Amino acid sequence: MKTLVMKFGGTSVGSADAIRQAAAIVKEYAPNWERLTVVVSAMRGITDALIQSAQAAARGDQSAYQALIADLQVRHYEAIMELIPSGEERKSLLEIVNQHLNELSAYCNSIHVLGEVTPRGLDTITSLGERLNARVVSAALRQIGLKSQPVNATGLIITDANFQNAAPDMEATRSRTRSKLMPLFDAGSVPVVTGFISATPDGVITTLGRGGSDYTAAILGTCLDADEVWTWTDVDGVMTADPRVVPDARVIPELSFSEVSELAYFGAKVLHPKTIRPIIEQDIPLWVKNTFNPSYPGTRITAAPQSDSGQVTAISTIPNLSMVTVEGRGMLGVPGIAARTFSAVARTGASVLMISQASSEQSISFVIPTANATNVIASLEAEMSLELARRDIDRIWSKDDVTILTVVGAAIRNTPGVAARIFGALGKTDINVIAIAQGSSEYSISLVLADTDAQNAMRYIHAEMLADV
Ligand code: ASP
Ligand code: MG
């Protein structure tokens, strides 16, 4: 049975025009697949607006949340009026919008009285965006002659009670998903499932985390043993670099899961690796495609791509960081300094993005968000007070305004000389490399640069390593 799960992100279903386009895509591909599931996000900006309404209620700003709720009504009304010509279908959809928004008003009023919103309350409130949009998109499919039904994922995806970032119980989810969706496929219907939302075994609404609709698609793809999962977005695929910085950035035709993980970790706005792990483990290929340019093939993500061009794959950057250095001649050969350094950092809750130690062992450097730098240095000074007094450690300092630039690609592991070419490209242009680290996966090399050098460095390295061949 040919099985496909298609997910449309917020922009792809963010207005009547976009929904019409998404519906046309579903109609075009539906005949090729025996079992087709559509997963939808809320309309673009709706999840943010729902969160803002809860926050306004918590701080007692009644007119702010009422205005937000009025806006939500206008956004959905407009889409429905444009998509569905007058009649019963339109009337009942408008009625559903009113019901859901009345529910939202009631939640906001009680948050207002209590003066606080809990994670559980936020999940119930944010679920409304997807619950509304699945109804609208499914109606748009029926409008163009497809058989379709909206499905609330709270009846499919069963999770723990870790609100706002719930983890699925895959066994329970698999059996519910199959028993609910199979009869719909058999009846020739295309289910439109709410992304992002889920429920505990007792039926309390949970969510899978921001951007969680990709995760929904991957979970359903796994449970349905899908042949492929497609995520429709508003770009042509995963790019070799940020096109706003590197004008000749291009779409990457094929990418491995490890490369996606490195890219996501080092700041690229690609799929969160957690969300796609389920389908990659099951060897289901994932395509990233453009709703507004549907004939373009997009990017294919698999466990292990066949083609190995010997080229690196992509460049990404994380700006506005600080590099902290612990240095002193007395550190040479003293065991335990590194462990104590990172325990002291961990106590502050800061997350370390990159570590580099010179082989002379006279310094350890690591990169953290600048917001954490003051606390981290204070914690290190307390931990190392004795060494500082004895001058075994000379100083602990931070260099602010730095960027981590990461070059990602399986080729880094297989092709000699990749690092040399990167440094060659920078050497020609007088860009100073502050520190270097290679990931142990050998899928990436990271450089620390001044923020002011980062964009040029990206362009030079892209021209050297990623220009069209
Ligand atoms: N609507 C949710 C969000 O904005 C989920 C998603 O778009 O994937 O985070
Ligand atoms: Mg989204």
Image: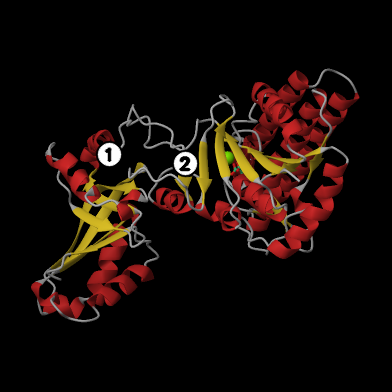
In which quadrant of this rendering is ligand 2 seen?
Answer: top right
Crowd tier of the residue under label 1, counting other residues whose Cα lies within 10 Å: few below 14, some 14–19, many 20 or above? some
Q: Residue at x 70, y 46 (%)?
A: 127
Q: Is residue 200 above or below residue 343?
A: above
Q: Assign a secondary structure to mark 1.
A: helix
Indicate the amino acid at tag 1. Met
Q: Is residue 118 visible?
A: no
Indicate the amino acid at tag 2. Glu
Where is residue 74? Give x, y as percent: 70, 26
Type of colouring: secondary structure
Q: Is residue 361 above or below residue 317?
A: below
Give the distance between the C-alpha atoms of the residues marked 2 and 1, in whole angstroms.
17 Å
**Left or right relative to 145: residue 226:** left
Q: Assign a secondary structure to mark 2.
A: strand
Residue identifier under label 1? 465
Residue identifier under label 2? 254
Where is residue 225? Give x, y as percent: 70, 53
Earlier in the chain: of badge 2 and badge 1, it is: 2
